[in-house]
Image (cartoon, helix red, strand yellow):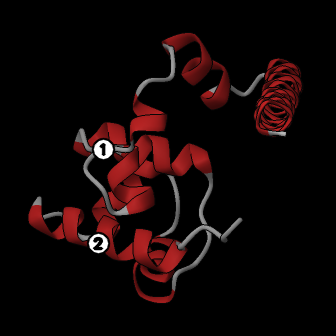
Amino acid sequence: MSEFDFSGAGKRMQKIRKSNNMTQVELAELLNVSSNHISHIENYGAKFSLDLLTKFCKVFKCSMDYISFGKKQNEALSILPDEIINILFSKNKTAQKHLVNYLNMFLNLYYREDVSNQMHRRLTTTQQMEAKQNQNA
């Protein structure tokens, strides 16, 4: 898994801020951070919190997908139900932990089923090949 591109996200945030004729100081006040932090995000790829990203996107009514990935829309994120989005962005660490555990369990079952289906297809194909060989013999 690749690491999050804070530098690219910072550049996209800067582009949006400037296109809205807002200074770093004004943005910092809205996001309740220092203007130095905004400068470091935009110019040096400083890390920022999910909370800051959420606030930024609300202020500018922009997509988190665009800031995060440089895309207008990321299908995987855009189809998540609102309940999951609310848990992800809440400060309820217990609910977030339960969601992560549930998703891990789901993915494990999904991939186990996928592997099981692949093995079944291979077994079926092997049996079919053996049957043809027996017919030809």
Q: In which quarter of the image is the C terminus?
A: top right
Query: Is residue 12 among what the camera can see?
Result: yes
At label 2, which amino acid type do we have?
Gln
At label 1, which amino acid type do we have?
Gln
Residue name at image x 61 percent, y 18 percent = 84
How busy is the neighbourhood of tag 1: few (under 14 within 10 Å), some, or many (20 plus)?
A: few
* Residue 108 tag number: none
Query: Is residue 104 among what the camera can see?
Result: no
Q: In this view, does 48 lie to the left or right of 105?
A: left
Note whether 61 is above or below 35 in the view shown: above
CA distance separating discs 2 and 1: 19 Å
Q: Quadrant of the N terminus?
A: bottom right
* Residue 73 tag number: 1
Q: What element carries label 1?
A: loop
Note whether 68 is above or below 8 in the view shown: above
* Occupied quadrant, residue 17: bottom left
Q: Where is residue 62 in the image (x, y as percent from the top left)?
A: 26, 44
Q: Is residue 89 left or right of residue 123?
A: left
Q: In this view, does 61 lie to the left or right of 99?
A: left
**Number of on-image labels:** 2
Q: In this view, does 35 lie to the left or right of 136?
A: left
* Residue on which the image places disc 2: 14
Residue name at image x 66 percent, y 70 percent = 2
Q: Position of residue 72 (x, y in %)?
A: 25, 50
Residue name at image x 29 percent, y 61 percent = 26
How busy is the neighbourhood of tag 2: few (under 14 within 10 Å), some, or many (20 plus)?
A: many
